[in-house]
Amino acid sequence: MASTTFRRTGKRATLTAKATIPRRRFEVGLLVISNIATIVAFLLAKFGLDQSYSPTLDPYVVAIVLLPYFGHLANRISAPDTDPAILPVAALLNGIGFVMIDRLDPTEAHLQVLWTALGIGLYSLTLFLVKNSDTLDRFRYLLVMVGIGLVLSPLVPGLGENINGERLWIHFGPLSFQPVEAAKLLLALFFASYLTEKGELLKRLSIRHIASIGSTLRSFGPLGAAWAIAMVLMAVERDVGFALLIFSTFVVTVWLATSNKTFLGLGTVLFVIGAYIASKLFAQVNERFTIWLDPWKYAQGIGYQIVQAQYAFGTGGYSGTGLGQGHPSLIPVVTSDFIFAAIGEELGLLGTTAILFAFLVIIGAGLRAAMRARSQFSSLVAASFTLTFGLQTFFIISGVIRILPLTGVTLPFVAYGGSSLVANYVLIAILARISHEGNDARHFGPQPPIQTK
């Protein structure tokens, strides 16, 4: 029986190699610019702290600028047609984050380098293992089961740990890990897989279908499951941030896949109801809303952190106090939850705008990958991952500047946190794979089929 397989012709391989060279050269150029920015920022921060010039570089900053080149090598070997901006811009954010963390807490900065090494290693490993993004569609139910298991794992006695009233961490000996960071990727993959199969059905769904029990269970079941996961995170683990992130990612991905506003409206209503109930039942959740509405009333208590962040932005003004010359250490937990406030104080509006632009570059690259993806599944994966990345960035920055209540999620690549850093490197690795596939198909078309027995 004949079957269809594919092979790359010599001519096609030559064309691919020629087209790939400019992309990878451009990527190296962007990495060099990222390196220069990181090194200059590091030296300025040291000068600001010590008030003396020293041309020597800490071995940790050397490591932080060299590690991304291993990712570049992985791109050359496994994804030569990927967008050249994704890895360098992530490296730039990682580098600037390292400089800010090092200036505030050198011990955490040294650990951040180790997490960066692990993140780059998993970035490369992901590209080597995931040769075709569509293969991930085969593991839909495994992904969702592992994802839900990770969400619930901090509740296991002896494994989870309660920190500041939140059960978000699990322990393996001396190591701590925030499992919901990995869960957000697995659940996003499941959302994409589910919508690839059920998208057409959901397009035709309207609010009147809710009257039909069978239709409701079949069509709204996954929405209810996503809502239930969000409520577990918010009510049991007291994690408002990831509850909002996971549920929002699912609802917006459904809307993108179906253009059906029913889910967008219903999802918003469900989350608002859940958040309201949680704020009434759980003090930890209620506290987030209280200090959001009027932090100045509690400036010497629960509102101290957010008030100090507002002072930091005010002190920074347009151009900032200068690296190493501000006082962001007055903000509790500044290296993780409030790193954006530290940047605002020492780099000012210009610095925070540059950071926002860098995030927009990665988001733009992710959306471009989604539009050029060669299959519906990979397109939805790219869209879902980009939404996860973009919404997480939006939620934490909005919390710091008081547009939204504090969520507790970390600023991707910039804030201190190994779980977040590693998960986001895996996220951009999948985006890089989908970008490579889309660019390869866009420039050269499908590979010619041959018949084999």
Image (spheres, grey):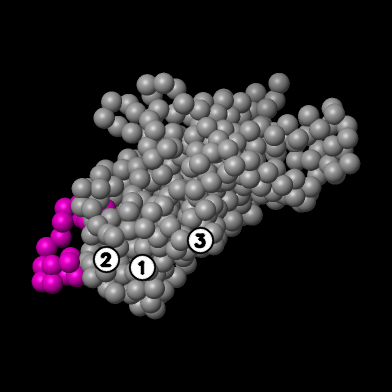
Q: Is residue 105 left or right of residue 18?
A: left
Q: Is residue 416 visible?
A: yes
Q: Quadrant of residue 94?
A: bottom left
Contact (CB < 8 A) between labels 1 and 2? yes
Estimate the spatial distance between the alpha carbons at disc 1 and disc 3, rounded to whole Å.
Answer: 18 Å
User: Which numbered disc, 1 or 2, marks the residue that appears first in the sequence?
Assistant: 1
Asked if the magenta segment contains residue 63, the reply would be yes
Residue 280, how many percent across, how many down? Answer: 59, 42
User: Which numbered disc, 2 or 3, marks the residue that appears first in the sequence?
Assistant: 3
Q: Mark 3 falls on what kind of element?
A: loop
Amino acid identity at mark 2: His
Amino acid identity at mark 1: Ala
Residue that label 1 marks:
312
Picture residue at 77% right of the left edge, 51% below the top:
261
Amino acid identity at mark 3: Asp
Q: Is residue 13 visible?
A: no
Q: Mark 1 falls on what kind of element?
A: helix
Residue 327 numbered mark, or none: 2
Picture residue at 23% right of the left edge, 70% below the top:
325
Q: Residues within 10 Å of mark 2 (few under 14, many from 20)?
A: some
Give the residues in magenta: 46-66
Residue 294 numbered mark, or none: 3
